[in-house]
Amino acid sequence: MKRIAVWTAMFAFAPMMHAQYLTTWVASYGNDGSNCLREFPCRTFAAAYIKTDSQGTIRAIDAADYGVISITKPITLDGGDSGATIVATNKVGIVVTPGLTDVVNIRNINIHTYTPEAILVYMNGTSVANIENVAITGDLAGGGISALVNAPANSSEARLNLSNVSIAGTFTGVQMSAGRLTADRLTVHTKYNAFEVGKAAEKVVVRNSAFHASNNGDAIIIGNDKASVYPLSVVIDRCEFSQSNTGIMISQYASSPVISVYVSDSVITQNLSGIRFYGATPQAFSFRNNIIAGNVSDEPALTSASFK
């Protein structure tokens, strides 16, 4: 009878051990051994993630460092108004490895990175990663946001959306190496390159954003190489590129798909070079009221391509 009672208790407890919920919670006073519900929150994002169902949401109750997290399913990570933070030391703060059609949302989080990146997204299929109201700070060894190719033939329609994101104090800012990007209100101030676009990236739209890279890096580098897969189209609207080595650098590898860059209502100033073209001549088009002035050299320096 005693053995039967023990087995009954084990089976009764088993569903609780593996239970997943649509909404889980973390708090500074939480315990990772709990069920992560509002009344019994977990202490880390990683623990709450295990107990959160696909399509579910992890929320923070108060301000604390909730640790790094790896995301491999459609989920929302939302710090709300809590002041939730991730401190990443020798680890990526948030790694997103979505399924082919997954949608991952990251909102209202502060991330401080020492090395390597604050957020790493592997672009896959038609997956979408939405990053909103995120502030990234770091030392000179860390990076901001990187979007890397999962497989070239499997990433061209994957999308990364950035809205109201700031990156400051890191070595690099945004590295877009795959898929498609839409960014609005993106502010980047780095020691080296603030924004890099190329390789397997295909379509990029950036609006209402500012990029500064000190004098050791470029505000934006748009380029490809012999491994590039897709024609690259970049739309820049109402942006600022300043306080950098080069405001806009466009590097076209001769035998790779063509790069097309469209710039409108933007300011390129206070750089050593305003605009530079490197390699083969890309397609660069200027529309409406661009201001290209106040640089040590305003005009393209390496080719005869015009940018008026």
Image (spheres, rainbow, N blue to C red):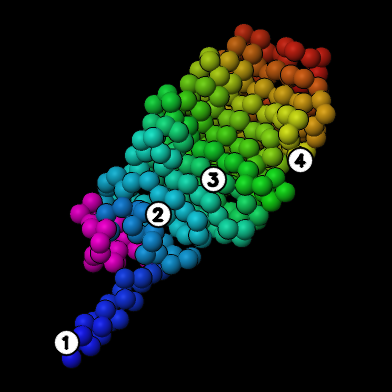
- At numbered mark 4, what does the secondary structure look like: helix, strand or loop? loop
- At numbered mark 2, what does the secondary structure look like: helix, strand or loop? strand
> At 52% from the left edge and 22% from the top edge, which residue is drawn?
192
Q: Residue at label 2? A: 78
Q: Which marked residue is nearer to the observer: mark 1 or mark 4?
A: 1
Q: Residues within 10 Å of mark 3 (few under 14, many from 20)?
A: many
Q: Which marked residue is nearer to the observer: mark 3 or mark 1?
A: 1
Does residue 33 show up magenta in the picture?
A: yes
Does residue 220 show up magenta in the picture?
A: no
Occupied quadrant, residue 23: bottom left
Q: Residue at label 4? A: 230
CA gap, disc 3 to disc 1? 52 Å
Q: Which marked residue is nearer to the observer: mark 2 or mark 1?
A: 1
- Residue 281 as seen in the image, left or right of residue 266: right
CA gap, disc 2 to disc 1? 46 Å
> At 81% from the left edge and 18% from the top edge, which residue is drawn?
305
Q: Nearer the viewer, residue 298 or 17?
A: 17
Q: Which residues are magenta?
A: 23-41
> At 48% from the left edge and 65% from the top edge, which residue is drawn?
55
**Location of residue 169 with respect to 178 vertically, above or below:** above
Q: Earlier in the sequence, mark 2 or mark 1?
A: 1
Q: Residue at label 1? A: 2
Q: Residue at label 3? A: 121
